Image (cartoon, rainbow, N blue to C red):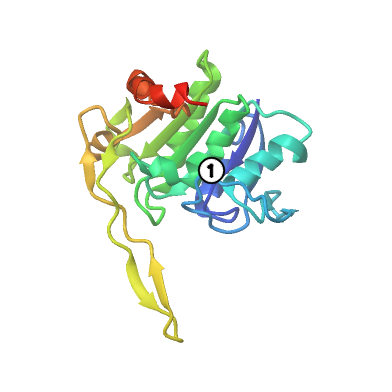
């Protein structure tokens, strides 16, 4: 078993160190992660400049790019082998509901998935690494289970772990993504020279936290495991858009 590990918090973040240590003994582990924090970078690739890869004293490779850059470079030129599994995290904070669209942690796993490699993203739902040891234990359990009983189809799993001690963990649930309200307004400020600048505001409140959502599972101290896919086609709207586009299709 060859495991590629990445994240979005940077190669020296506590989460990736804990995850890598937790996976020891499960296979050959290679870490390729961003040089700096890339939270919120989503699936972006750096196309306007070359990227450098360096190796830290602990053996971790780090790239001056995004999480997607890291996995892409690893799979298309850096490594001389194809990993059996891509694992991302452990993220410093939740990736629930709509967060997955912006998450660099999920993006790193997604890049592996796009190359046909089973991929899992792990996040600790509260910032600050509280009970990181328990999150690392859960991550190992999930990876061990995947190795012992791999799913037949392509796999992209988004795993969120409550920031509680193991004694308070209720178990594990398979969930769907919930939804949030729109984000809070931007925060306007100014540079010392009086130029206006804007900080992206906080995430919105939870809108859909139904019983089978990731939000509901976390609220009840369950580990949330959500299978993801990348087909953005709105299949239920195809017929309606076909009828709407009829005149456009008829006129060259």
| Residue drawn at x 46%, y 21% as measured from the top left | 250
Q: Can residue 206 be seen? A: yes
Residue at left offset 33%, top offset 46%: 163
How dense is the environment of label 1, judged by Cα within 10 Å: few (below 14), some, or many (20 and up)? Answer: many
Q: Is residue 109 left or right of residue 189?
A: right
In the rendered image, the quadrant that contains the N terminus is top right
- Outermost residue on the top side: it is 152
- Residue 249: x %, y % from top left: 46, 23
Above or below, 182 relative to 248 = below
Residue with the most extreme bottom position: 193
Rendered location of residue 168, percent (x, y): 27, 39
Task: List x then y, in percent, for residue 211.
Answer: 20, 29
Which of 94 and 137 lies nearest the eye of the viewer? 94
User: At x 44% / y 46%, what residue is drawn?
Assistant: 102
Q: Which residue is mark 1?
A: 43
Q: Is residue 156 left or right of residue 177?
A: right
Residue sitting at x 73%, y 36% = 76
Q: Is residue 79 above or below residue 236?
A: below
Count of residue discs: 1
- Asked if residue 22 can be seen in this view, the reply is no
Q: Is residue 221 above or below residue 236?
A: below
Is residue 152 or residue 163 the one in the foreground? 152
**Looking at the image, which residue sits at the far right?**
80
Secondary structure state at the residue bearing disc 1: loop
Residue 87 drawn at (x, y percent) = 55, 35
Q: Is residue 143 left or right of residue 34?
A: left
Picture quadrant of residue 169: top left
């Amino acid at each position: 078993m060859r495991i590629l590990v990445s994240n979005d918090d940077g190669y020296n973040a506590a989460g990736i160190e804990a995850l890598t240590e937790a996976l020891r003994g499960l296979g050959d582990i290679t870490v390729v992660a961003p040089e700096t924090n890339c939270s919120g970078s989503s699936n972006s690739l750096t196309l306007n400049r070359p990227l450098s890869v360096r190796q830290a004293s602990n053996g971790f490779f780090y790239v001056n790019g995004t999480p997607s850059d890291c996995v892409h470079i690893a799979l298309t030129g850096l490594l001389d082998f194809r990993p059996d599994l891509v694992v991302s995290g452990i993220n410093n904070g939740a990736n629930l509901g709509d967060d997955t669209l912006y998450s660099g942690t999920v993006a790193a796993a997604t890049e592996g998935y796009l190359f046909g490699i089973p991929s899992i993203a792990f996040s600790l739902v509260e910032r600050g690494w509280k009970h990181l040891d328990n999150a690392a234990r859960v991550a190992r359990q999930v990876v061990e289970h995947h190795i012992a009983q791999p799913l037949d189809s392509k796999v992209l799993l988004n795993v969120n772990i409550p920031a509680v001690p193991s004694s308070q963990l209720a178990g594990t649930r398979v969930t769907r993504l919930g939804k949030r309200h729109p984000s809070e307004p931007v925060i306007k400020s100014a540079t010392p020279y009086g130029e206006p600048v804007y900080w992206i505001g906080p995430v919105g409140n939870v809108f859909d936290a139904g019983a089978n959502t990731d939000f509901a599972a976390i609220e009840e101290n369950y580990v949330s495991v959500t299978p993801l896919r990348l087909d953005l086609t709105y299949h239920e709207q195809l017929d309606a858009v076909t009828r709407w586009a009829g005149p456009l299709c008829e006129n060259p």
